[in-house]
Image (cartoon, helix red, strand yellow):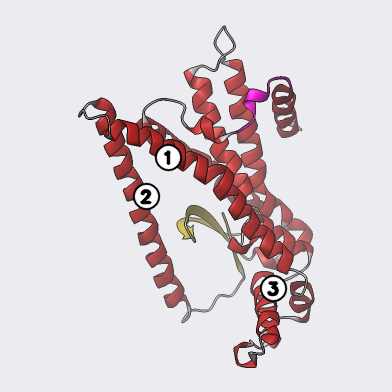
Amino acid sequence: MLYGAVVGGWTWAAIARPDLAPHPGQIFFTHSLLVVQLVITLGQVPLLLLHEGFHILAGRRLGLPTRLSVSNRLTYIVAETQINGLLSVPRAKRYLPFFAGMVCDGVVFAVLGLVADLTRNPGGSFSLTGRLCLGLAFTVAVRVLWQLQLYLRTDLYYVAATAWNCYDLHDAGMTLMKNRVWRFMNRPDRIVDEEKWTPRDRRVGAFYGPFIVLGYGAFAAITVFVSVPVTVNYASIAGRALGSGGVDASFWDAVLSLCMNVAQIVALVVLSRRKRRNKNSAHSLTSSSPEVELA
């Protein structure tokens, strides 16, 4: 009830004052690119841990062992909560652990928006605190949209798989969709044996293809409406600072900011390689209970 009141309060405030609605420009809450990156990057750490903490608490509530780790999913660096045995509990009890992180994100987003609204300057403009809160709130909103990328096995994917009572819906759906393509192209040599999956996975997987496409559509939307505007704005600010002709504070601010970007790319590569090594070593191990990784 409290969570609903908080989200309802933000909704009422956003209807009355539309400038609370998330948009890419909110990321740049100050002129310093370095400060923006440090605050947004470091500010995400407690918010991500809080998101995963909700997953952990929901798993512990069922008496299941949980573990927190840092990994990557394609080009994203993510924190993951591994809940052993979750797929062995009754379906009705799995939904809370799956939804817990998104519930957390919704409440955090609303709280940040309300703080921004309550700390406005006398003239109605946002204070520095308010702009910072809106910048963090925008990243939380993007994280909620990220859940629509079902091909990454996000929390919403597990909700869908549970609702349809499937064990390995993603791989079954992808295989069935690819097999249709190979049959159409008259390439029987590329067709994969569909008997590897349960009859239920095959039945649901037969119409799961559009949901996979929806996931890629969400990725495209995030790229067009979030990544591209933020990148263009960032490049414009950095370009002006580096091309000003003077080695001043703004120049070094842009240089250090670019170094942070390089460091994040390096971290992504390291995590990707570590994940591949762990997967290769896991082939020789067996597990006594199913494991779910929630991001």
Neighbourhood count class around disc 1 (C-alpha, 10 Å): few under 14, some 14–19, many 20 upward: some
* In front of the other: 225 or 71: 225
- Let me know if residue 28 appears in the view: yes
Please state the horizontal and vertical placement of residue 266, each as a whole percent of the image: 33, 55
**Left or right of residue 89: residue 143:** left
Quadrant of the drawing holding the N terminus = top right
- Which of the 4 image quarters holds residue 50? top right
Residue range corresponding to the magenta coloring = 16-22
The verdict on residue 39 being magenta is no
Amino acid type shown at disc 2: Gln
Q: Residue lying at the far left in this picture: please name it.
A: 247
Disc 3 to disc 1, C-alpha distance: 35 Å
Amino acid type shown at disc 1: Thr
Q: Residue lying at the far bottom in this picture: please name it.
A: 189
Q: Which residue corresponds to mark 2?
A: 264
Disc 1 to disc 2, C-alpha distance: 10 Å
Q: Which residue corresponds to mark 3?
A: 173
Query: Taking 93 as reference, is 10 above or below it?
Result: above
Please state the horizontal and vertical placement of residue 119, each as a whole percent of the image: 56, 15
Amino acid type shown at disc 3: Gly
Disc 3 to disc 2, C-alpha distance: 33 Å
Q: Which mark is residue 41?
A: 1
* In front of the other: 181 or 78: 181
Q: Identify the element where label 2 is drawn.
A: helix
Please state the horizontal and vertical placement of residue 102, each as a whole percent of the image: 65, 45
